Amino acid sequence: MVKAAVVPGTLIIRADAGSNIGVGHVMRCLALAQVWRMRGGAVVFVGDIPADVSRSLQQEGMRVCILSTVYPDPNDLKSVERLATNLEVVGGLSWIVADGYNFDCSYLEGLKKTGLRVMNLGDFAYQSGFPSDIFLNQGLGAATLHHATLLGKVSLLGERYRMIRREFVLRRDLQRTIPEQASKLMVMMGGADSRNVTSDIVSALAKGPCKEMDICVVIGPANRHVSKLEALAASLRMPRLQLLIGADIHEVMAQSEMAVSAGGSSLGELAYMGVPSVVVIVADNQEQESRRFGELGAVRCLGCWEDLDGAAVADACASLAMDKIARRNMVEAGKRIVDGCGADRVVDCMLQEELE
């Protein structure tokens, strides 16, 4: 049972980003933060966050506090506790959200001592619960995983709670035309792409039929391989190849007829935007979700990068580009999975006066 809703106060989001872990934790929390601010609350991001990502958050109206050390260093928790204690709260119900695989029960217990409500995000099946008020797993099929009976006081599980950033949600009326042959390809291998998988894929695309496509390569804000990618693009002499740094991804997706992408939070965005996609798993935490999207027909999941090469990805792209029926089916499957209302549902739950 839930009781009367209250107005939002201050939302403290504890999440990190960087070249080693990517930007997925921060970006999905941004979707939550956008809704929180629209409801009248204030938002503070706290973490080890690169300058480019920090500037983007500030442009969204978020306050950002950079941590010099992160958990398990004790100064991490002390800094968040101090912020929660001294923060000038705007009134209403305030929360701390923790999104990161290193935030264990001890860390969450420390957050609870601030007196604020705590929500933690996870992506896997867990054998025991957490000392949090809400546990959120927005993954496909999360409700059927072997979860403990009580992961938090309230557990929000499954695609119903998938959080999509507002710039994507605003494109809900986008009308897709499925061409006989796709000619506009988006390449997006994550916010960091620490292994520079992008270079191998682009090199392979240049050797096959996809070289005739309009190819937009989105370079994430934590990518350290920009100079290498620029040199590669110059050497390939492909006039229809573009490298996009700091691009509005929702606009690129809206213009793209298909994509090759890493797994991760971008899968939900691609599905919502109706972009048929070839997906490559580049990190262990992407495997479960990427394969589920593939099983439901929303993407063509090729498997783990360690078992592939650029040529295999390029061949899959060429095949999908010629298969109109497969691309249409992907668009329809994606729309069934992601409805764009997940962040609103999460905030609705957070703003209940009593959680039961």
Image: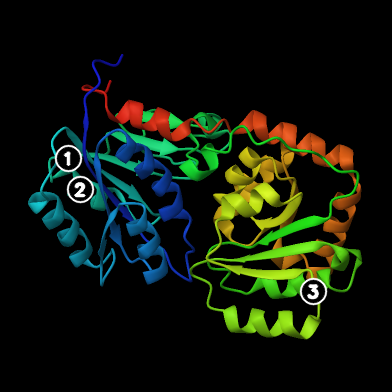
Which residue is rendered at x = 47% and y = 39% of the image? 163
Q: Residues within 10 Å of mark 3 (few under 14, many from 20)?
A: few
Q: Which residue position is annotated with label 2?
A: 111
The nearer-to-camera label among 2 and 3 is 3
Closest to the observer, 219 or 72: 219
Residue 79 appears at what percent x and percent y?
A: 17, 61
Callout 2 crowding tier (Cα within 10 Å): few <14, some 14–19, many ≥20: many
Mark-to-mark CA distance, 2 and 3: 52 Å
At mark 2, the secondary structure is: helix
Res. 131 in view: no
Mark 3 vs mark 1: in front: 3
Looking at the image, is 124 positioned above or below residue 63? above
Query: Camera-side residue: 227 or 161?
Result: 227
Q: Residue at x 64, y 41 (%)?
A: 273
| N-terminal-most mark, 1 or 2 | 2
* Residue 109 to residue 338: above or below: below
Q: Which mark is residue 162?
A: none
Which mark sits nearer the N-terminus, 2 or 3? 2
Q: For residue 207, what is the image quadrant? A: bottom right
Which residue is identified by label 1?
116
Of the two numbered discs 1 and 2 in the rendering, the one whose residue sits closer to the viewer: 1
Earlier-in-chain disc, 3 versus 1: 1
Say what amino acid the circle numbered 1 marks: Leu
| Quadrant (top left, top right, bottom left, bottom right) of the N terminus | top left
Residue 210 pos. (x, y %): 86, 63
Disc 2 marks a residue whose amino acid type is Leu
Q: Secondary structure at mark 1?
A: loop
Residue 239: which numbered mark, if any? 3
Q: CA distance from mark 1 to mark 2?
A: 8 Å
